[in-house]
């Protein structure tokens, strides 16, 4: 059975940092997926960028984007999900390769606004491959269903464990 992990935590706890550290530790594995990061101007958060494991980067959400959809004060560009995030995930779900790891940061409201993204994530979790994804601690029908899957391990990420967790996960995933 493949490893399927959801790292659950509150905003700002270090989910993205943990996933990036995990990816850096797993250089021997083929990794597909993406991470997100805040865009800041003058100390204020104004948006979020998405970067794939292959190095493609695009602005996912920004205060200057009109929306819809809107998540809080951010307009979300769903084309970024369809054109940047989904190709590698779709390929991974339809063509599982031994040793490949799918990293998804994150399964949040902005990303889940894309119906096609939800479908691909569902396929990724059903495929025979290792998956590590981050998810907010708040309730959402889609992520709640993933959390209830019997093959998914839910790990709470906190300020106390966020530094050690990437190394622990890398050890587990390298020994697969």
Image (spheres, rainbow, N blue to C red):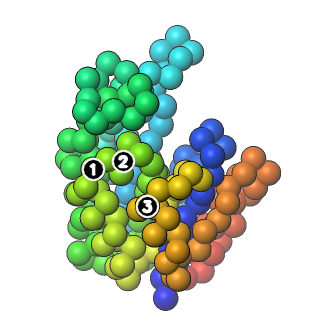
Q: Is residue 61 in view from this perspective?
A: no
Q: Is residue 80 in view from this perspective?
A: yes
Q: Which residue is mark 2?
A: 111
Query: Is the residue 76 above or below the residue 105 in the image?
Result: above
Q: Are marks 1 and 2 in contact (CB under 8 Å)?
A: yes
First in residue order: circle 1 vs circle 3: 1
- Other-residue count near label 2 (Cα within 10 Å), few / some / many at <14 / 14–19 / ≥20: many
Q: Is residue 73 rendered to the left or right of residue 60?
A: right
Q: Which residue is mark 1?
A: 114
Name the image quarter holding residue 170.
bottom right
**Which quarter of the figure is the C terminus placed in?**
bottom right
Distance between the alpha carbons at the discs numbered 2 and 3: 14 Å
Please name the residue shown 60% across and 80% down the image: 175
Query: Is the residue 74 above or below the residue 176 in the image?
Result: above
- Other-residue count near label 1 (Cα within 10 Å), few / some / many at <14 / 14–19 / ≥20: some
First in residue order: circle 2 vs circle 3: 2
Rendered image: mark on residue 141: 3
């Amino acid at each position: 059975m493949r490893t399927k992990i959801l790292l659950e935590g509150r905003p700002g706890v270090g989910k993205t940092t943990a996933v990036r550290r995990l990816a850096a530790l797993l250089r021997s594995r083929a990794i597909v997926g993406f991470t997100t990061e805040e865009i800041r101007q003058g100390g204020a958060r104004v948006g979020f960028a998405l970067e794939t494991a292959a190095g493609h980067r695009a602005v996912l959400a920004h205060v200057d984007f009109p929306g819809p959809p809107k998540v809080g004060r951010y307009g979300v560009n769903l084309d970024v999900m369809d054109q940047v995030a989904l190709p590698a995930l779709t390929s991974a779900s339809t063509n599982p390769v031994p040793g490949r790891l799918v990293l998804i940061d994150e399964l949040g409201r902005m990303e889940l606004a894309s119906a096609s993204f939800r479908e691909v994530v569902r396929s990724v979790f059903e495929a025979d491959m290792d998956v590590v994804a981050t998810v907010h601690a708040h309730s959402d029908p889609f992520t709640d269903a993933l959390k209830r899957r019997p093959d998914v391990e839910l790990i709470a990420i906190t300020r106390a464990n966020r530094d050690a967790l990437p190394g622990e996960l890398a050890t587990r995933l390298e020994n697969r």
